[in-house]
Image (tube, rainbow, N blue to C red):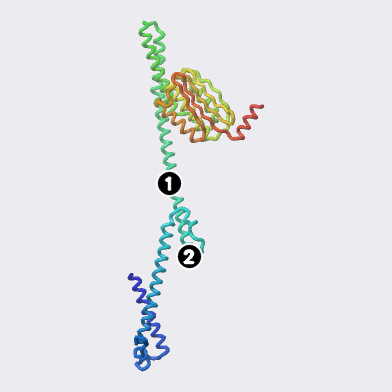
Amino acid sequence: MIAFISRLFTLFITFSITLFTILFLILGEPTEENWRFLWEDLVPPNQVPIIAIMLAILFALSFVISLWMGFSLLLKESTTTRYVRKIAEPNFSQTIGKSNSSLNKAMRVANELIETQRASLQRLATEKVQTNDAIVQERLLAERQRLARELHDSVSQQLFAASMLLSALTEQEQDPKSQKQLGQVEKVVQQAQLEMRALLLHLRPVALRNKTLAEGLEDLILELQEKVYFNIDYQIEEIALSKTEEDHLFRIAQEALSNTLRHAKANEVELLFIARDQLAILRIQDNGLGFDVDGDKTSSYGLRNIAERAVEIGCTYKIVSVPNEGTIVEVKVPLKMEVSLQKEVQEND
């Protein structure tokens, strides 16, 4: 309101000075004789002096112009406010009219700058999270390897020594009751060894390290055969997969074998890694105790890891277990067309 009144009086004074200047140029020096008609000559019907009519017209003109200027400024302010509020919205540059006005150009430049800054901040935030995750994973892996070394050098060796001593004692002539007790203790120690080896396999997993998945699986099985008391049959084929797929399948096999060592009490394990019908199939089967897939939670953590890794590489999986019959973990990865054709050619040859 103050701005409107200020504009009104400024315009009125400006127009009055302009009118006075024009009259001065036309009538000459403002003497009573030259300028008398302005206030003595009356305009009918109300007998109003000419000067009063002129000033009224100037005031009305000033009022109209001030009102128009006020509305124009309000309109521009509203438009600018709307642009400023929307400028931070995605795709704002597409909503601005394609006119060449300076305001639109300025809004586009500001929007491009904000979008650039937003993208930079998002990239920095993502890189920070990824860096933090990588650091945490590296530290976790180092700590797990340290624990695995300590367990292997201490507890695992002690269990092995206790198992050897118990085996020697059971071979000596003793009363049946003592031999039975020693046999039970030996079974407990052997089970503890299996638990320890499964734990070491989980804490310090063997990495592929520039090997193919087939080579890594074979090395893993050969290492386990030296440490476990049951037989592991396997059939492994060389199949071309991506690095991510190979790594996830290798971890799935480790997780499944670790669960078998810890919970299954199996005496036979079969591992298959073959290509059939444009699918790479990884199957681990044991004849252990099995479990209720819906109700038994003893292996839920390992099974959840298997499921998550399978989903991450976009493959299908199934876990079938029957109590006192055994467990099957199967993962199928779709092969690319060229891999499937290459496999068919090799089979035909």
Give percent across and percent down for residue 81.
Answer: 40, 61
Q: Nearer the viewer, mark 1 or mark 2?
A: 2
Name the element at disc 1: helix
Residue at 47%, 25% (x, y): give it.
Answer: 320
Point out the residue furthest to the left here. Answer: 2
Residue 47, horizontal then vertical, whole percent: 34, 87
Report which residue position mark 2 lands on: 102
Amino acid on which disc 2 is placed: Ser
Rendered-image quadrant of the N terminus: bottom left
Badge 1 is on which residue?
Answer: 125
- Does residue 97 sit above or below 130 in this rendering? below
Q: Amino acid at mark 1?
A: Ala
In depth, the one of 176 and 340 nearer the eye is: 340
From the viewer's side, name the closer residue of 309 and 73.
Answer: 73
The quarter in which the C terminus is drawn is: top right
Q: Residue furthest front?
A: 45
* Residue that lies at the very extreme toward the right in this rendered image: 349
Is 56 located above or below residue 193 in the figure?
A: below
- Residue 248 in the image: state x and y as whole percent: 50, 32
- Local crowd size for mark 1, using a 10 Å CA cut-off: few (<14), some (14–19), many (≥20): few
Residue 64 numbered mark, or none: none
Counting from the top left corner in percent of width and height, residue 51 is at 36, 86
Which element is circle 2 on?
helix
| Left or right side of 188 for 338 | right
Tell me, yes or no, whether the two marked residues, 1 and 2, touch with CB atoms within 8 Å. no
Give 141 or 333, whichever is nearer the viewer.
Answer: 333
Above or below — where is 85 with respect to 131?
below
Q: Quadrant of residue 277?
A: top right
Give the mark, 1 or 2, whose residue is nearer the N terminus: 2
The residue lying toward the viewer, choosing from 160 and 248, is: 248
How far apart are the alpha carbons under marks 1 and 2?
34 Å
**Circle 2 Cα neighbour tier, 10 Å, few/some/many (<14 / 14–19 / ≥20):** few
